[in-house]
C-alpha cells in the first residue's frame, strides 16, 4: 500500500537534522572581534516574535531535531527567553543556553531552570579579567561571568565553558582548564577562531603563529587525557595551518540548521556570505519544507556538487569537501575544494596568508551595529 | 556536534565499579526515544549517543535507586540469559558512559 506517509519516507528524502541553532537576537553587551554573527546585524524590530519561535520549536521537534542551542547575540536580552525554553521542554527538545553570562541574575536563572533548561554554555574570552574584558570590550565582564558560573552550578545546572582561541589568549589555555575545574564545569570547549565575518576582518589581530598553535594543540590533548572522566574537553581546530579540511557542519544540510533572528534558515551561520544562495524564511515555509526543499540547503548537499578531485577522494564522506564559505572567501568560488586541503592548488597560498597575518600588529575592530541608515 | 554510536567496547578508566554501586543519569543528560530516526538516544551537552537495543534496555533501568546487581538481575530474568555474562557487559557499558561524563555513581 502506497500511503502518503510512506511516500514521505522515500530514500530521496533527507534524513532529519539533529541540532538547531536558534539565534534569538543579534543584540549583545559584548563586542568580541571574532563574533560569528554576520557583519550586517539584524535589529530588534526585525526579530521573530515569541509565537513564531514557539511554532519553529514545535516544527523542529516534529522534524526530528533533538537539541536546540539558544544563542545570539545574547539570548538573555530576549524578555521571553523563559517562554522559549518552556516551549523547547514542552516538545522534548534538549535546550542549551549559549550566553555571555553578564546579564542573568539569580532569579532569572532559577526561572530558566524551572522552565526546563537542560544546560548552560558560558563564554569566557580569557582566563583573567584583563584579557577577557579587553577582548569583550566590556569592563567588569569577567567578574560577572565568574559570579554567574557559580550561580549556574549552585542552581544545579550543568555548565560548559567555551572560549574562542586566538593570538590574544592562546597562552592562557592551561589557565582556562584550571578555571573550568575551579568553576565546576563538566565540559570545556576550546574553539580556535574560524575566520568568517568579523573574525575575517580581524584576521591580522587574531591569527596566531603556527608553532604556538601546534603547542596549544598538544596542551589540550594532554589535559584531555589527564582529566578523562572529570572534564570533557572538546576542541575546534585552527584550520588555516591544517593539512585536511574540517568536516564543516558534518556536511552541508546533513545534521543541523540555523535560524537567524529574522527567521531565515541557513545550513550554517556563515552561509549568507555565499552570494546567489536562496534562503527560505520560517515566515513563509515550515521548517520541514525548508530542510527538504530550500535551494540553499540543496546547493551543496551530499557529494554531487563536488569537484572531480573531491568526488574521487576516499575522504569525500568524512570531510564533505570542507567548508563552502571558506572555499568562496579564499578562492572566489564556493564549489572549489576547501583550500585547507593539501590537494588544493590554493593550499600554500592560505598557509602563507596565515603566516603573514600572524606577524601583523593590527588593533581589534570590535563587533557592533553599523550606523542606523537614515 | 557529533552523533556518537554507542558501542559496548572495553570500558577501562573506572576500576571501582561494584555490583552494589548505584548509577544515575545526571541533570543535563536525558534519555529519550528518537521517533524520527527510530531507537533511543542519550542527549548530553553538544552530544547525542544513539543507543543500540541492549544499551537502551540497560539505561531505561538506570533510575538512581536500583544498584547494578538489581539491574543485572532484572535483565537476566527478562532475557533469560546468563547473569555472569550480563554483569560483565553492563559493567563495561556503564563504566564507558561514566568516563564520558554522561552517567554518575551516586
Image (cartoon, coloured by chain):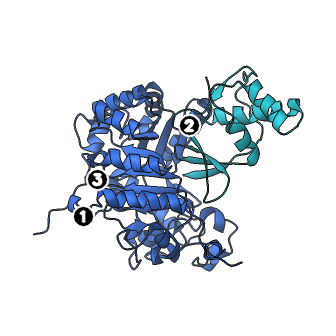
Chain colours: A blue, B cyan
Numbered disc in front, either 1 or 3: 1
Residue topped by disc 3: A362
Q: Numbered disc 2: what chain?
A: A
Q: Quadrant of the C terminus of chain A?
A: bottom left
Numbered disc in front, either 1 or 2: 1
Cα distance between the residues tagged 1 and 2: 38 Å
Residue nearest the observer in this picture, A74 or A274 = A74
Q: Is residue A84 visible?
A: yes
Is residue A199 shown above or below A315?
Answer: above
Numbered disc in front, either 3 or 2: 2
Residue B24: % across, % down: 62, 30
Q: Is residue B106 left or right of residue A148?
A: right
- Identify the residue at the far left of this view: A374
Q: Is residue B89 left or right of residue A21?
A: right
User: Closer to the N terminus: mark 1 or mark 2?
Assistant: 1
Residue A53: % across, % down: 36, 58
Q: Quadrant of the N terminus of chain A?
A: bottom right
Q: Are marks 1 and 2 in contact (CB under 8 Å)?
A: no
Residue topped by disc 2: A232
Which quadrant holds residue A365? bottom left
Residue nearest the observer in this picture, A238 or B57 = B57
Q: Label 2: few (<14), some or many (≥20) within 10 Å?
A: many
Residue topped by disc 1: A46
Q: Numbered disc 3: what chain?
A: A
Residue drawn where x is 27% and y is 51% of the image: A364
Q: Secondary structure at mark 1?
A: helix
Amino acid at each position: 500500500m502506497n500511503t502518503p506517509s510512506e511516500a514521505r519516507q522515500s530514500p530521496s528524502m533527507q534524513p532529519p537534522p539533529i541540532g538547531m541553532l536558534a539565534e534569538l537576537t543579534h543584540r549583545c553587551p559584548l563586542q568580541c572581534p571574532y563574533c560569528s554573527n554576520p557583519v550586517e546585524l539584524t535589529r530588534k524590530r526585525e526579530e521573530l516574535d515569541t509565537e513564531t519561535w514557539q511554532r519553529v520549536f514545535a516544527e523542529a521537534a516534529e522534524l526530528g531535531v533533538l537539541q536546540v542551542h539558544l544563542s545570539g547575540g545574547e539570548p538573555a536580552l530576549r524578555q521571553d527567553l523563559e517562554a522559549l525554553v518552556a516551549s523547547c521542554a514542552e516538545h522534548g527538545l534538549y535546550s542549551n543556553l549559549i550566553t555571555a553570562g553578564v546579564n542573568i541574575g539569580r532569579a532569572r536563572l532559577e526561572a530558566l531552570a524551572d522552565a526546563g533548561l537542560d544546560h548552560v554554555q558560558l563564554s569566557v574570552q580569557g582566563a583573567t579579567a584583563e584579557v577577557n574584558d579587553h577582548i569583550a570590550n566590556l569592563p567588569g565582564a569577567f567578574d560577572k561571568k565568574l559570579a554567574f558560573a557559580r550561580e549556574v552550578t549552585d542552581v544545579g545546572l550543568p555548565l560548559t565553558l567555551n572560549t574562542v582561541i586566538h593570538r590574544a589568549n592562546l597562552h592562557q589555555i592551561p589557565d582556562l582548564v584550571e578555571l573550568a575545574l575551579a568553576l565546576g564545569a563538566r565540559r570545556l570547549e576550546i574553539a580556535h577562531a574560524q575566520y568568517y565575518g568579523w573574525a575575517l576582518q580581524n584576521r591580522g589581530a587574531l591569527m596566531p603563529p603556527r608553532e604556538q598553535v601546534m603547542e596549544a594543540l598538544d596542551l589540550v590533548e594532554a589535559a584531555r587525557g589527564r582529566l578523562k572522566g572529570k572534564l570533557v574537553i572538546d576542541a575546534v581546530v585552527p584550520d588555516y595551518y591544517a593539512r585536511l579540511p574540517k568536516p564543516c557542519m558534518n556536511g552541508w544540510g546533513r545534521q543541523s540548521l540555523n535560524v537567524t533572528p529574522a527567521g531565515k534558515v541557513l545550513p550554517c551561520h556563515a552561509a549568507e556570505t555565499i552570494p546567489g544562495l536562496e534562503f527560505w524564511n520560517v515566515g513563509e515555509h515550515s521548517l520541514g519544507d525548508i530542510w527538504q526543499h530550500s535551494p540553499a540547503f540543496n546547493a551543496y548537499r551530499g557529494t554531487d556538487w563536488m569537484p572531480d578531485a573531491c568526488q574521487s577522494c576516499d575522504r569525500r564522506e568524512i570531510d564533505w569537501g570542507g567548508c563552502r564559505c571558506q572555499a568562496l572567501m579564499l578562492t572566489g568560488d564556493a564549489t572549489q575544494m576547501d583550500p585547507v586541503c593539501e590537494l588544493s592548488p590554493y593550499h600554500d597560498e592560505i598557509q602563507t596568508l596565515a603566516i603573514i597575518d600572524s606577524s601583523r600588529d593590527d588593533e581589534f575592530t570590535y563587533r557592533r551595529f553599523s550606523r542606523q541608515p537614515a | 556536534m557529533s552523533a556518537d554510536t554507542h558501542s559496548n567496547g572495553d570500558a577501562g578508566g573506572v576500576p571501582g565499579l561494584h555490583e552494589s554501586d548505584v548509577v544515575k543519569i545526571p541533570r543535563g543528560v536525558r534519555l529519550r526515544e528518537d521517533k524520527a530516526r527510530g531507537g533511543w538516544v542519550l542527549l548530553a551537552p553538544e552530544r547525542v549517543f544513539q543507543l543500540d537495543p541492549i544499551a537502551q534496555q540497560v539505561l531505561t533501568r538506570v533510575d538512581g535507586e536500583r544498584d547494578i546487581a538489581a539491574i543485572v538481575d532484572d535483565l537476566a530474568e527478562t532475557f533469560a540469559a546468563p547473569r555472569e555474562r550480563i554483569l560483565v557487559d553492563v559493567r563495561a557499558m556503564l563504566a564507558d558512559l561514566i568516563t564520558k561524563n554522561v552517567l554518575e555513581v551516586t
